[in-house]
Amino acid sequence: MFFKSHFGTVLTSVLSIFMGLVMALCVIFLNHLPLTWVNIFELWAEIFWIVFIVSMFIPYNTWGNKFAELFHLKEGTVAFALVQGIIPSVVLNSFNTFICTAASIFYNPAIPQAARMEAYIHGSLSSWIPCFIVSYVASFVAVWLGKIVAQKFATE
């Protein structure tokens, strides 16, 4: 089976599932939305697909590795992991913030059309930093879980 034969695909799938859930909860609490299954599922699904698709086309881990190497950090150390994780979190958080904010504002009939762009800019700027912090911390757990699942179920 194609899925089980690729370590990275399994890891990315687990990463997408976990990050989708964590970030959905973050957005719900950040925007004071009702904690309902509908809100959780809608945001989770949106973030899951963003993370999964971006992960297929943008080599953010390679960029993160090169960024950590700029500081002459040794791969496998905690310092390397902490610095390397900045770039993937910036990339994924930016896509998530700008796309999710756009979807929630530009398709919201309660927001007057003339006010949507200002609301989008304000929403994106005010949520980027808190979401980055949460995604940066959660990414370490997500990658750890992804590696465990991938090692168990995937073959190279």
Image: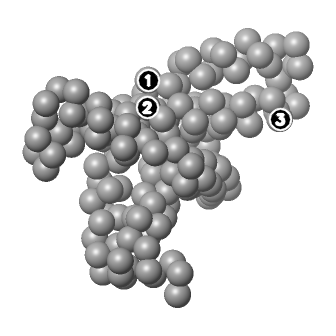
Residue 133 visible within the image: yes
Tell me the number on the disc at residue 154: none
Residue 132, quarter of the rendered image: top left
Image height of 132 relative to 28, above or below: above
Is disc 3 surrounded by few (<14), some (14 to 19) or many (20+) residues within 10 Å? few
- Name the element at disc 1: helix
Residue at 44% in and 23% down: 129
Q: Amino acid at mark 2?
A: Val
Q: Nearer the viewer, residue 139 or 77?
A: 77
- Sequence-wise, the earlier of marks 3 and 1 is 3
Residue 10, quarter of the rendered image: bottom left
Q: Nearer the viewer, residue 26 or 97?
A: 97
**Residue 139, how many percent across, how many down?**
35, 47
- Marks counted in the figure total 3
Q: Which residue is mark 3?
A: 107
Tell me the number on the disc at residue 90: 2
Residue 29 visible within the image: no
- Sequence-wise, the earlier of marks 2 and 1 is 2
Q: Amino acid at mark 3?
A: Tyr
> Label 2, label 1: how many angstroms apart (C-alpha)?
10 Å
Q: Which residue is mark 1?
A: 129
Task: Report the side of 60 relative to 20 (left or right).
Answer: left
Image height of 120 relative to 44, above or below: above
**Residue 90, how many percent across, how many down?**
43, 31
Is disc 1 surrounded by few (<14), some (14 to 19) or many (20+) residues within 10 Å? some
> Label 2, label 3: how many angstroms apart (C-alpha)?
25 Å
Residue at 30% in and 80% down: 152
Q: Residue furthest bottom?
A: 1
**Residue 79, how many percent across, how many down?**
13, 36
